[in-house]
Image (cartoon, coloured by chain):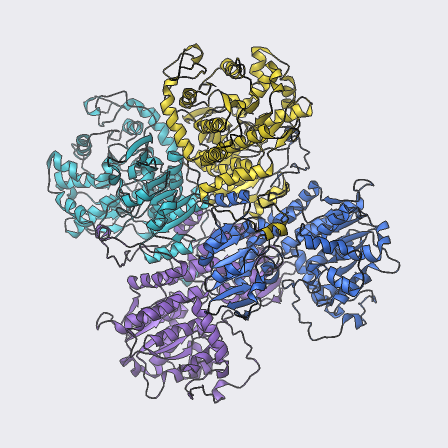
Chain colours: A blue, B yellow, C cyan, D purple
Amino acid sequence: MAHKHGHGREQIQFANAEDKQEFSKFPTKAGRRSLSRSISQSSTDSYSSAASYTDSSDDETSPRDKAQVNSHGSTNFCVKNIKQAEFGRREIEIAEQDMSALISLRKRAQGEKPLAGAKIVGCTHITAQTAVLIETLVALGAQCRWTACNIYSTQNEVAAALAETGVPVFAWKGESEDDFWWCIDRCVNSDGWQANMILDDGGDLTHWVYKKYPSVFKKVRGIVEESVTGVHRLYQLSKAGKLCVPAMNVNDSVTKQKFDNLYCCRESILDGLKRTTDIMFGGKQVVVCGYGEVGKGCCTALKALGAIVCITEIDPICALQACMDGFRVVKLSEVIRQMDVVITCTGNKNVVSREHLDRMKNGCIVCNMGHSNTEIDVASLRSPELTWERVRSQVDHIIWPDGKRVIVLAEGRLLNLSCSTVPTFVLSITATTQALALIELYNAPEGRYKQDVYLLPKKMDEYVASLHLPNFDAHLTELSDEQAKYMGLNKNGPFKPNYYRY
Amino acid sequence: MAHKHGHGREQIQFANAEDKQEFSKFPTKAGRRSLSRSISQSSTDSYSSAASYTDSSDDETSPRDKAQVNSHGSTNFCVKNIKQAEFGRREIEIAEQDMSALISLRKRAQGEKPLAGAKIVGCTHITAQTAVLIETLVALGAQCRWTACNIYSTQNEVAAALAETGVPVFAWKGESEDDFWWCIDRCVNSDGWQANMILDDGGDLTHWVYKKYPSVFKKVRGIVEESVTGVHRLYQLSKAGKLCVPAMNVNDSVTKQKFDNLYCCRESILDGLKRTTDIMFGGKQVVVCGYGEVGKGCCTALKALGAIVCITEIDPICALQACMDGFRVVKLSEVIRQMDVVITCTGNKNVVSREHLDRMKNGCIVCNMGHSNTEIDVASLRSPELTWERVRSQVDHIIWPDGKRVIVLAEGRLLNLSCSTVPTFVLSITATTQALALIELYNAPEGRYKQDVYLLPKKMDEYVASLHLPNFDAHLTELSDEQAKYMGLNKNGPFKPNYYRY
Amino acid sequence: MAHKHGHGREQIQFANAEDKQEFSKFPTKAGRRSLSRSISQSSTDSYSSAASYTDSSDDETSPRDKAQVNSHGSTNFCVKNIKQAEFGRREIEIAEQDMSALISLRKRAQGEKPLAGAKIVGCTHITAQTAVLIETLVALGAQCRWTACNIYSTQNEVAAALAETGVPVFAWKGESEDDFWWCIDRCVNSDGWQANMILDDGGDLTHWVYKKYPSVFKKVRGIVEESVTGVHRLYQLSKAGKLCVPAMNVNDSVTKQKFDNLYCCRESILDGLKRTTDIMFGGKQVVVCGYGEVGKGCCTALKALGAIVCITEIDPICALQACMDGFRVVKLSEVIRQMDVVITCTGNKNVVSREHLDRMKNGCIVCNMGHSNTEIDVASLRSPELTWERVRSQVDHIIWPDGKRVIVLAEGRLLNLSCSTVPTFVLSITATTQALALIELYNAPEGRYKQDVYLLPKKMDEYVASLHLPNFDAHLTELSDEQAKYMGLNKNGPFKPNYYRY
Amino acid sequence: MAHKHGHGREQIQFANAEDKQEFSKFPTKAGRRSLSRSISQSSTDSYSSAASYTDSSDDETSPRDKAQVNSHGSTNFCVKNIKQAEFGRREIEIAEQDMSALISLRKRAQGEKPLAGAKIVGCTHITAQTAVLIETLVALGAQCRWTACNIYSTQNEVAAALAETGVPVFAWKGESEDDFWWCIDRCVNSDGWQANMILDDGGDLTHWVYKKYPSVFKKVRGIVEESVTGVHRLYQLSKAGKLCVPAMNVNDSVTKQKFDNLYCCRESILDGLKRTTDIMFGGKQVVVCGYGEVGKGCCTALKALGAIVCITEIDPICALQACMDGFRVVKLSEVIRQMDVVITCTGNKNVVSREHLDRMKNGCIVCNMGHSNTEIDVASLRSPELTWERVRSQVDHIIWPDGKRVIVLAEGRLLNLSCSTVPTFVLSITATTQALALIELYNAPEGRYKQDVYLLPKKMDEYVASLHLPNFDAHLTELSDEQAKYMGLNKNGPFKPNYYRY
């Protein structure tokens, strides 16, 4: 089962034997070492795009060692510097402008407070966009405690702004792994407050609760999980009969998938290449390995800007689509000598091998939009006969003995994670989906959801989409009674069968 | 449940109450009148594109009243004129050039004769492309008897060419409804020959066997059904517990769907509009109702040629896709006054109402790519204050009292069925899928398929695609052992989970 | 000097020695034979698209031998059948709907009658669109006499409708060459009426007046010429010092050029290929020879529909543009074996040679969008070892001894002339340009124009464009006084220097 | 006469009265003050893209006060820090990889040394790309002295690398205006060395020579000028009869124009918007003011990425092109309320007025791709009721009293100058054109060029293009003798008439 994503988050390979093994071990281990091994890959990924604008590097004191208090007198948080709150507030306000779906959700649901009584413990990237989500949850009645799912991605100012308004946040940019688990623990383990909902991104929070505070699950009504990795862990738990509450897989909702992969990659491939190499796209010969959603997005954009694109595929159906969309389908070895740019979007490993790299022409650019850092065999380039020259951040020239240079971006890690940004609009879709999933799980009548992993009901997926239509001044048509009857549809949806391909 | 297709074949609305009612009645009625009612809509659709090139209109004698014999002395057929065989043979040869997938299948499977012993009774459009299919089945070991699924669509010369080679064919262009059922009966009811496989397109043959020769099903190993209508009937039978053999729904295979809808409509919308109206696309304001596969195909092509396209949608997810693809999402009533062209692709009824028609500007073109003839309320235009003027075949000017003209194409029936052609390549994909479905059902071990309706296994869908890749000189990449293991895939596929959206 | 056009009219090669020779002879020869040689190529080109919808083939009597009278009692015309006038009127009315620029011109200029006193003798294709032009000229005050510039292209019903309203028309579909010159003569040589303006398309009328009635030029204020051929002849006359009145070259106006070539070919390449071959464009490998305006139009459309297009060029600047637009630039011989379609747009000769044809793959389609019938060496295919098989109108299969078939369209003549239609909108631009050129020449103060060939003033070119903007509901911005001063422009144009490339 | 460029260089308005006035003054004034007024706008433009990668801010000593010597013992230069030479050399080597046209020119012309004896004084941006040009000139036999045309744009390391190899360079990043003229003077005024060729970008060097060392022109064979401003000054001199040597206008060569405007803007609009705002293009409503080459480039790119684009135009011909290309043509005031992004590409002033700005919706982005900083009336936003908030480099939020924010990029200056980079490939075309112009002027036989301003001969323009084709592995077709004769062309070009529009 291949999973291809390009949205700047971690991804794991479900059916990979080693992964499974590691996973099966993880709930049983304890102690610092085992934590270090079982930490989700995502939590240590580099994360450039959501970086802080202000420079916090001058203050070397660990936040754990600082005594901080917000203007309301609370010390129930741990952030880099509470004084950055004002700057963070401005960042949140800017993000709000592009997240009108959440603001709209606040307004629509505020009267009834659908999350009244909800006590949500969250573990996500802590960015201005996440802050908009958290403050929406609060506006809908929830109490929240929050921590970071990645040791690099926290925007310190935003964390400060949240702490200032009274949300207990435990996170800063540049945590050590020990800090990471300490923050999660502080978030979960609070006197007089016990979570009844979990929002997780990567599964580390869920893992920690399983390991340290299993009794918490007695009160938890559900887990909402955002990432491929975390979803995989949940399916494993479910399969093993160990999942003790309902869980919602929001990663695989249609809207999120299309935006994270097709639409977002359509833009980020251009952005990532431009920021790193200043390449002119017109006339460039490009091979894109893999014609899934990510590959389709990359090919569309590059072709539109005048690149001459061919693709490689293992799946004849995707290959036939590529043909019909106007791309030659080739084997990498047939074309590698002519290519100006090589982009991997397969989710597989060693798609670009040392042999391919040896045959590339001088100046060829190689980058990865697909999966962790396995697609390009970068390790094979760490050999004595080759010289590495770092020419810019995220850009290395690998120099062959004959002077040939191959340009490797982000050392083969995800280009769009490392070298471009994720538009707020994409994050808005994700955040809205998370909010609706929390509302659904929290309010579902007893028995609707069992101890299993669920996809977001299609109707809610449609609701997420509808909340974003005003951004485009898009006007939906409503079915007449007669038409609804003719189509056998409810006028409010859902409008498509589950198997619909969109 | 909305089903949208634009491939030039009939479609029915599954959940439509009237349809269901009519359907539930159909196996119980008998006699000429009831037949006339239960005949599938497809069998009487006009069908221009596959029309005979030669003029047969001079010979008014019914084929049923003629004594004909082929050059081998056989009289076991009934066609318009056996003497047209040579011309038909040439048409078949031309079709073979674009159907290399079937020719390739003949070669690959000829040694083992996977259809040896198969006795196939078929009811489809009888065209050069179908002849390539039939002769492939014969080459693979089958005996075939064939009849037409539509009273207009038979290419007489092709029927003659098939009859000349010894295939018992019972079909001609311009059958009466009585002829239609007579031909089906002659096809099924043959002394000393009993079918063990059925290939149907529309369900009329299957219906006839159910009604008249139910005992035939004792020997039948399976039914392969091509059309939406026929598939619907089979699901109804299955639901009612009356399906007594396995059936294969080839209509919903990925490859067929994408080609019949997205890719084929991308081209046929241009072709249909151009042949009927000589319109210049550049700068035209077009509204496309419905952004499913058919709508997506239409929008892509029109935008590419410089039209300014907006869309209407009821489903927020499709609407959001339209936004991201660069189309304004509007209500029809908001834009109707400005539009140069209105195209329906919804599968719904009365999407374009008399009120809309009244507000269109002079010269507006209205046509339907979606569903039978219900989408545009053409009936409302048959009123005394409006003048109809037929300006060309398939083109009517409807003239309002103030002189305003609205141009209605094909009287609101499917544009691409009536006014453009279906490329042989699309038909090749359908025919290959049918052939593989017959092979699969005929050779499946006892018990693999129950008395139910099945989708083509994904692996066979992939095989259909792979047989068509040589047309594009496309070269698939093969997984290495290491990669297959890493991905958890078999090197020969299937490569995607069933829920994959392509 | 290469001239490339694809608009369905004749083209000649200016610098071609043979042409020059022939041309230099033409004003001196007389008699039937020389006429036959000096007749413009355009006058005998096949012309399918503007063909009559009604069948006139049943009446074999020559119009010259018929006595006809219109309902006003006039016999001052010669058409196929005056009784077809009503049908022709309807065609004209339909054309008027897409020619609102001319209708608008009628309205704007009707008060002042800028052509009052003008006596225009015209020689053009006689189609519904031309009728709208003629009736506009009449509405603006002109008297007109008209004849056909092509022996095949006259729409008989339209000619009848014009004759019925009192315009002396001398033309029918299927004239002999003798008829052709007889009609021109009847048009020019009328008792008591002498032309003071000439509107010509191909130069034959101008030629005839030079040869037979040179004294007419004493009263003629100017010639407006539409075609490449005719313009060439005028420049030759001018160079030789024999041009005795001002002439306006409307062929090279920006608007006409862009529409006749880039925009019109963008659509007609698809239309022409589809109507003749029903080809599916997706995934087809296409080589386009020549990346001028015609080639650019073809490439844009084919790429947009999923074809994989490469180009050949002799000019490095155009080749570099092709690269930037995303097309591989190749030599024909390098790719010929892989191509599915070969399209010539060069204006050159023998671009596709017998050697290329020999190396094409089975089923390859070859057609010409560029220049007369010289680009493909079709003559080389008329050899005994090859079999020609006419499979449809305009479609020949050339069969090699080994069974390979190459599909040649329109026997190498212009595809869009033979196999597609020219949209009324394009003809509207041409007709409006002609009308404005007549008004300009007729009203120009003494001395503005000498005995030379002129391009339409840029301001009038802009006016033609502005008259067509309402078709698109396009709203121009007007310069403020301050902006006009800043730009150094007159607020009413012209807005660009003459060398502007658009 | 409107000149629209978007390539990151200065532009002036030819017909602008104030400009003319200033210019007419400039050769007569002397002294520090007048210099400060007559300095070309380009010399003080901010210039972000070619910025040094190394940080030189720590060394505050003026280069004029430092004693530096290169490794060969020479002190004949003045740069920031000669020790940075090695790093600069690497930058040059990297640039060489994308400037193979110049490298190829070195190889082709090296044997004959076409610039032997040439003494070139140059004044341009000093970047790695310029260094490749300078070293090419040296390789072809020239001696060079060089200075900077802009006080911000010098890459100090590159200047050091040039100085290290013995080229007398006088330039550093962050010159004062006094430094600027001092450097020019040092460059021109050298004992025992007198220039015989001038390569200028902006006209400041030429101006200085005119003013201070007019006798130099006795030996100068020609001036090659790159910029709109400088070209304008030369035409002024020529008109005034004061141009005393031939000058070559390389700014208006076809190749340079298409690359600087159409192709480069197609990419830089995306890059500039993305780097500053992280906007998602899909579904955004964008209005582009002006549909010249720059506007066409912007529209193409934005439409391709899913934006919904409309345009404003004053010229009906460009407006009609926009229609045919699929863009609605509107007045800005009609649509301003709905727009997400407003982009100016007109070359005019106050195209976006305060009134427009007042009516924009919250979050609207405004930027300029067209002309200096006049197109958007940014000055009108500097009023007390509005708050400016700098949110990132080059990004300001202007906040209305009601909280509405409008996002202004680069304070209305050129977006692509300020916020994106110019690809090396575009610079390669410019540099190659400059080199060829120098060779042409230096080697032209007496009398070919008078004391006037010339465009590059079309054949040389074609040669520049041909030198760049190998970058794309593009293969030109050669005319056969027969074809060349038929076309009336020389087999080596030029291939098009001068008025050809490309």
Locate residue A265, reporting x and y percent: 57, 54
Q: Is residue C346 left or right of residue A12?
A: left
Q: Is residue D231 left or right of residue B13?
A: left
Q: Is residue D33 visible?
A: yes
Q: Nearer the viewer, residue D13 or C284?
A: C284
- Picture quadrant of residue A63: bottom right
Looking at the rendered structure, the number of numbered marks drawn on it comes to 0
- Picture quadrant of residue C472: top left
In the rendered image, the vertical position of residue A296 relative to residue C181, given as above or below: below
Q: Is residue D55 left or right of residue A194?
A: left
Q: Name the quadrant of the C terminus of chain A.
A: top right
Locate residue D52, reporting x and y percent: 52, 74
In the rendered image, the vertical position of residue A292 relative to residue B183, given as above or below: below
Q: Nearer the viewer, residue C38 or C121?
A: C38
x 28%, y 55%: residue: D478
Q: Nearer the viewer, residue C281 or A244?
A: A244
In the rendered image, the vertical position of residue C238 relative to residue C393, given as above or below: below
x 45%, y 86%: residue: D71
Residue found at the far right of this picture:
A192
Locate residue D484, reporting x and y percent: 23, 53
Q: Is residue C120 visible?
A: no
Locate residue B424, reporting x and y percent: 45, 33
